Image: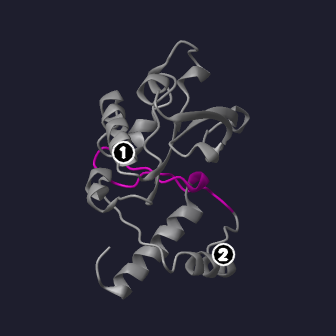
């Protein structure tokens, strides 16, 4: 975002429009970084929920948000900072290519780098909560995240999948919550 309020407002309005009119509110880009989610064909999408927008605005008044590569935020994370990390999820099947939802991909190498970053900011005293897919949904012997985050609390939670072209294939699947905050679970 730039410092131009009118330009930032227009970007926010366009983002909300895309969110309300694209398939299942999904945001995804192709390998060129271009938005590529199809139209959702909704008859009467709620484009502006004024009460919700005002409530969100009130809640976010004193919140500082940053956008960019997660590694860039390390310098201002300190003791007492709460950090929620929702990376591109590791695919649990050959056909679930969640990593393609980002321009540059997010392989196991990047997952490991993120794990090292999470450990580093945790050691600084930050409160960390991260989410990811649970590979044990399809392979009970896949301990990738259990090993990577062995020094953190890992909770498997049921989450409803809402993104699938076949509505009958949408439903509950386990996901991971990884945290250094024991009381979260």
- Separation of residues labelled 2 and 1 (CA atoms): 37 Å
The residue indicated by pointer 1 is 123
Q: Which is nearer the eye, 52 or 180?
A: 180
Q: Nearer the viewer, mark 2 or mark 1?
A: 1
Q: Is residue 7 left or right of residue 151?
A: left
The majority secondary structure of the magenta stretch comes to loop
Give above or below for 121 relative to 142.
Answer: below
The N terminus, quarter of image: bottom left
The residue indicated by pointer 2 is 52
Q: Residue at x 70, y 64 (%)?
A: 43
Q: Which is nearer the eye, 66 or 151?
A: 151
Q: Which comes sooner in the sequence, label 2 or label 1?
A: 2
Q: Residue at x 53, y 24 (%)?
A: 135
Give the farthest residue toward the top: 141
- What label sits on residue 145 in the rendered view? none
Q: Which is nearer the eye, 147 or 52?
A: 147
Disc 1: CA contacts within 10 A as few (<14), some (14-19) or many (>=20): few
Q: How far across and down, in percent of the image, does residue 46 sit?
A: 67, 71
Q: Secondary structure at mark 2?
A: helix
Give the total of numbered labels: 2
Q: Quadrant of residue 64 in the image?
A: bottom left
The C terminus, quarter of image: top right
Q: How far across and down, in percent of the image, does residue 48 sit?
A: 62, 77
Q: Residue at x 42, y 44 (%)?
A: 101
* Mark 2 and mark 1 residues within 8 Å of each other at the beta carbon: no
Q: Quadrant of residue 6 in the image?
A: bottom left
Q: Secondary structure at mark 1?
A: helix
In magenta, the rendered stretch is 23-42
Q: How far across and down, in percent of the image, does residue 175 sit?
A: 60, 35
Q: Residue at x 38, y 79 (%)?
A: 8
Disc 2: CA contacts within 10 A as few (<14), some (14-19) or many (>=20): few
């Amino acid at each position: 975002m730039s410092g131009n309020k009118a330009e930032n407002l227009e970007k926010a309005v366009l983002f909300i429009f895309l969110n309300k009119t694209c398939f299942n509110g999904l945001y995804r880009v192709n390998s060129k970084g271009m938005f590529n989610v199809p139209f959702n064909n909704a008859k009467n999408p709620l484009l502006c929920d004024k009460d919700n927008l005002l409530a969100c605005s009130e809640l976010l008044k004193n919140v500082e948000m940053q956008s960019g590569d997660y590694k860039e935020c390390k310098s201002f994370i300190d003791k007492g900072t709460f950090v929620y990390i929702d990376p591109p999820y590791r695919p649990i099947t050959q056909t679930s290519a969640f990593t393609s939802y980002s321009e540059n991909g997010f392989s196991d190498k990047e997952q490991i780098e993120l794990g090292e970053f999470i450990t580093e900011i945790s050691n600084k005293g930050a409160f960390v909560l991260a989410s990811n897919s649970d590979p044990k949904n399809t392979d009970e012997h896949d301990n990738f995240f259990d090993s990577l985050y062995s020094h953190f609390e890992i909770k498997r939670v049921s989450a409803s999948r809402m993104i699938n072209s076949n509505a009958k294939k949408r439903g509950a699947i386990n996901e991971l919550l990884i945290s250094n905050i024991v009381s979260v679970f």
